[in-house]
Amino acid sequence: MPWYAWLIIALALGSIVGSLMLLRDSARKLPLTEEQLKRIHERNAEADAKDAEDR
């Protein structure tokens, strides 16, 4: 392959990796209260029970 093809490939890969790193750095955790966490865990337990029942 010519050198400019390798350059284009390197730029494309660098762009993808850079975008993923930027996305990771900009992500932040949601500040949830204890009550919200409790409701989420309860819903997950209900969904798991329903899935187990369906099997």
Image (cartoon, rainbow, N blue to C red):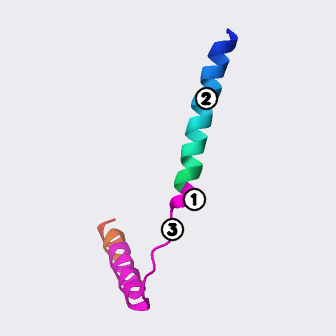
Q: Disc 3 to disc 2, how far (Cα)? A: 28 Å
- Boundaries of the magenta span: 24-48
The crowd level at tag 2 (other Cα within 10 Å; few <14, some 14-19, many 20+) is few
Q: Mark 1 points at which residue?
A: 25
Residue pushed farthest top? Answer: 2
Residue pushed farthest right? Answer: 3
Q: Earlier in the sequence, mark 3 or mark 2?
A: 2
User: CB under 8 Å between callouts 1 and 3?
Assistant: no
Which residue is at 66% across, 19% downward?
6
Which residue is at 45% across, 74% downward?
30
- Tag 2, which secondary structure? helix
The crowd level at tag 3 (other Cα within 10 Å; few <14, some 14-19, many 20+) is few
Q: Earlier in the sequence, mark 1 or mark 2?
A: 2
**Given the image, on which type of amino acid does mark 3 rest?**
Arg
Q: 11 or 32, which lies in front?
A: 11
Q: 37 or 48, which lies in front?
A: 37
Q: Mark 3 points at which residue?
A: 28
The quarter holding residue 36 reads: bottom left
Percent of width and height locating residue 15 = 57, 36
Disc number at residue 11? 2
Percent of width and height locating residue 23 = 52, 53
Percent of width and height locating residue 47 = 33, 73
